[in-house]
Image: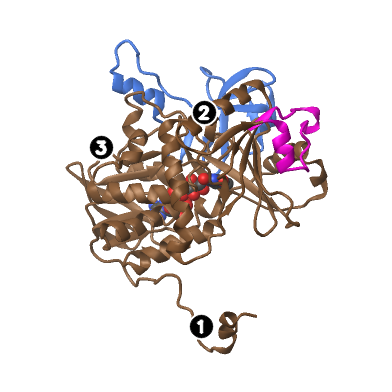
Amino acid sequence: MKLLCCPVNGLRPVSEFAYGGEVRAMPDPATCSDDQWADHVFNRSGIPGVKIEWWYHLPSGVWFHAERDVVADRVLRTWMPGEEAAP
Amino acid sequence: MPFQLLRFALSSKHPEPRMFRTPERLKGSYDAVIIGAGGHGLAAAYYLARDHGMRNVAVLEKGYIGGGNTGRNTTIIRSNYLTPEGVAFYDQSVRLWQDLATDFDLNLFYSTRGHFTLAHTDSAVRTMRWRAEVNKHLGVDSELVGPEAVKAACPQIDLSCGGNAPILGALYHAPGAIARHDAVAWGYGRGADQRGVEIHQQTEVLGIDIVGGRVQGVKTSKGYISTPRVLSAVAGFTPRITHMVGLRTPIYVHPLQAMVTEPMKPWLDPILVSGSLHIYVSQSARGELVMGASLDPYELHSTRSSLDFVEGLAAHMLDMFPFLSHAKVNRQWAGMADMTPDFAPVMGTTPVEGFYLDAGWGTWGFKATPVCGMTMAHTVATGRDHDLIGAFNLSRFARYELTGEKGAASVGH
Ligand SMILES: Cc1cc2nc3c(=O)[nH]c(=O)nc-3n(C[C@H](O)[C@H](O)[C@H](O)COP(=O)(O)OP(=O)(O)OC[C@H]3O[C@@H](n4cnc5c(N)ncnc54)[C@H](O)[C@@H]3O)c2cc1C
């Protein structure tokens, strides 16, 4: 991956972006157990595959989602959170 | 020419035996199976056979001996870490390194150079002083020195770093060393092999059989083996193995890259690390400058290398050594680093009985090869964590008892 398509700014060099990690659901801190919370804080799905991630366009301050193959380093699509993913 | 060498020319058969046997096929069962024939897996096999009398052991390697991070690392050996647990552990490793070449009867090119971690900011100076005090308290040779000590050890350096990041001081660690990485894997491998351990290259572990929370056996690309004990020492492949046994861990994988220049006359004696410039450099016995930087910025399960890396590293190297502008880069490469949130490893027993982990070695595990082998062999043989690795158990995360080594491990591997 050398270019990444920001849903707002279009195709930009990857050096303009920061990686924000995999998109994960947060358990409710008020009701979950200590073990569930520790699992959320520390544990990750470290295995390879296609993952949905957070990325950030530094110059414009845009956070968005990218679906990426973390073995081939190929981005399948990017979209704004809450919006329908582009095909 | 030494007669030793002449023998090879005169003999029609190769007069030296191979370093390792190539066992014909897997046996049906072993007392222990070690996944990964990197330095760590082979060292564990060596100490299992030598110190615990466990010889019915197989080391399974999907590629070739030392072809993982062991053969890709920049071989910095030091013990100037930040936590008392870390310092005690790495110090034991530095001690083990001293006798290793004699143990193996093999030249490891172990070369004590002295190691400077440069500080370019007040906060970095503060961390260096903290590390120096922890180290001294635990009997490790470290001290905070001024810029003039850096200049004296390395007259070629531009102390102002091009005016961008003047060097204010450094943590100096006299025992800092480099070694020949391949020879370490070969030495441990040969020593294990001579004691009856079988090393199976081109043999991939595809699954691990668990019955009633206990390890029963291992599925491999060359057939099934039953065994009550499995040690995983697979560095960047760890998440795939823990997934096979249903364990969740904090380990995530980013590439770490490195590069070397063309060989030049010896001019750089010490090892230099700069956390602010994100670079480190040493000169190998061959005369190449071995250089590295921090991790690639995002998850990737690949050993591809990138031009971005060379550009960034070279730019910062020129801040310190402008005269290198005409030096050519000969090679670059990458390894898959198994990172943890606290920059300390994940070692020892796990909730799965008979399944042991030696992982989370990220960018800093080569120096620990001897002590990992020794402590993991003890752990596998007795079923209990060795005293030196209690602070590294996987269970620390659920207790929020992290072993914070980031200040000592993030750039200076
Ligand atoms: C560029 C770079 C620079 C580094 N610099 C330093 C440094 O200066 N100092 C330092 O202390 N550390 C450094 N490190 C870290 C160090 O290299 C590692 O922590 C250490 O070598 C890990 O050794 P290992 O034996 O655990 O893993 P490896 O050497 O990676 O061995 C693991 C083996 O397991 C095999 N394997 C994986 N999956 C399977 C399977 N399913 N079945 C069978 N076999 C399998 C792999 O093929 C591999 O050979 C660096 C790392 C890199 C990448």
Front: mark 1 or 3: 1
Q: What is the drawing colour of chain B? A: brown
* Dot 1 and dot 3 within a common chain: yes
Which region shows up in magenta? B146-170
Is residue B31 at all visible to an observer of this figure? Answer: yes
Q: Amino acid at mark 1?
A: His
Q: In the drawing, does residue B177 fall left or right of residue A50?
A: right
Q: Quadrant of the C terminus of chain A?
A: top right
Q: Chain of mark 3?
A: B
Label for residue B133? 2
Looking at this view, is B408 or A9 the one in front? B408
User: Residue A46: horizontal and vertical position, in percent?
Assistant: 43, 37
Label for residue B14? 1
* Dot 2 and dot 3 within a common chain: yes
Q: CA distance from mark 1 to mark 3?
A: 49 Å
Instruction: Give whichever of discs 1 and 3 has the lower sequence position.
Output: 1
The answer to whether mark 3 is within 8 Å of ligand 1 is no
| Up-down relation of residue B290 to residue B149 (above or below) | below
User: Residue A43: horizontal and vertical position, in percent?
Assistant: 39, 30
Looking at this view, is B153 or B20 the one in front? B153
Front: mark 2 or 1: 2
Q: Chain of mark 2?
A: B
Instruction: Give whichever of discs 2 and 3 has the lower sequence position.
Output: 2
The reply to whether discs 2 and 1 touch (Cβ–Cβ < 8 Å) is no
Chain letter for the blue colouring in the rendering: A
Mark 2 nearby-residue class (10 Å; few <14, some 14–19, many ≥20) = some
Q: Quadrant of the N terminus of chain A?
A: top right
Q: Amino acid at mark 3?
A: Pro
Secondary structure type for disc 3: loop
